[in-house]
């Protein structure tokens, strides 16, 4: 049995926002090599962004939107699993080369990255952590949107004085 739970899509932002996102995404290729896995990922995302932009402009390709993803229940009993197919996988780095996957392989983890910060104002250096990612879904009137967040956390135990 095949299931797809997305019946309609609503784009937030302006057309200029989407065009800028596409431009910035394309610019990410300058940080890769043609054989690089990230380059392959970007090359797969760009046509999706093009479709999003066309849809925003009112040119809807129903065949494209019908293939966001399908979920198929495979097997029976304790060995059964849910197979995910569709272009949604191209948005999931690490799964972007697969035609299908077990739905449990889709990870929407948060990312935490340390950043060294130097303040000329306080003459101090410290480590801060930038934490962000997908944190849930907001639902209203049958519309659903991802909830993303970004936080900066000071590690006060790392404060040191800069040299004068």
Image: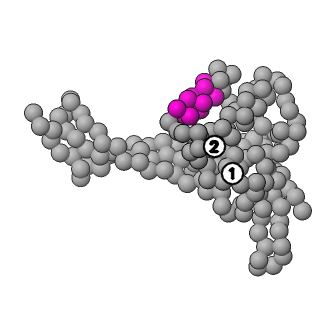
Q: Residue at x 81, y 58 (%)?
A: 71
Where is mark 1, residue-wise?
A: 97
Q: Is residue 10 visible?
A: yes
102 left or right, relative to 5: left
Q: Is residue 74 above or below residue 69?
A: below
Residue 19 image offset from top left, x and y in percent = 65, 23
The residue that mark 2 highlights is 40
Residue appearing at x 66%, y 38% in the figure? 43
As rendered, which of 124 and 40 lies closer to the eye? 40
Q: Residues within 10 Å of mark 1 (few under 14, many from 20)?
A: some
Query: Element at badge 1?
Result: loop
Magenta part mainly helix, strand or loop? helix
On-image quarter of the C terminus:
top left
- Quarter in which the N terminus is drawn: bottom right
Residue range in magenta is 20-30
In the drawing, does residue 1 fall left or right of residue 69?
right
Q: Quadrant of residue 48?
A: top right
Residue 129, given in percent of the width and then of the height, sits at: 37, 47
């Amino acid at each position: 049995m095949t299931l797809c739970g997305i019946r309609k899509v609503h784009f937030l932002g302006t057309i200029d926002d989407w065009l800028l996102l596409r431009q910035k995404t394309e610019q990410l290729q300058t940080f890769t090599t043609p054989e690089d896995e990230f380059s392959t990922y970007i090359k797969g995302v760009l046509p999706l962004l093009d479709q999003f932009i066309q849809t925003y402009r009112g040119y809807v390709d129903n065949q494209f939107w019908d293939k966001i993803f399908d979920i198929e229940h495979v097997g029976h009993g304790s060995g059964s699993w849910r197979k995910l197919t569709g272009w949604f996988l191209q948005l999931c780095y690490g799964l972007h080369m697969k035609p299908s996957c077990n739905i449990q392989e889709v990870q929407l983890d948060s990312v935490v990255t340390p950043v060294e910060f130097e303040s000329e104002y306080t003459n101090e250096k410290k480590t801060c952590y930038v934490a962000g990612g997908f944190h849930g879904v907001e639902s209203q009137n049958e519309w659903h949107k991802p909830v993303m967040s970004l936080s900066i956390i000071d590690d006060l135990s790392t404060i040191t004085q800069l040299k004068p």
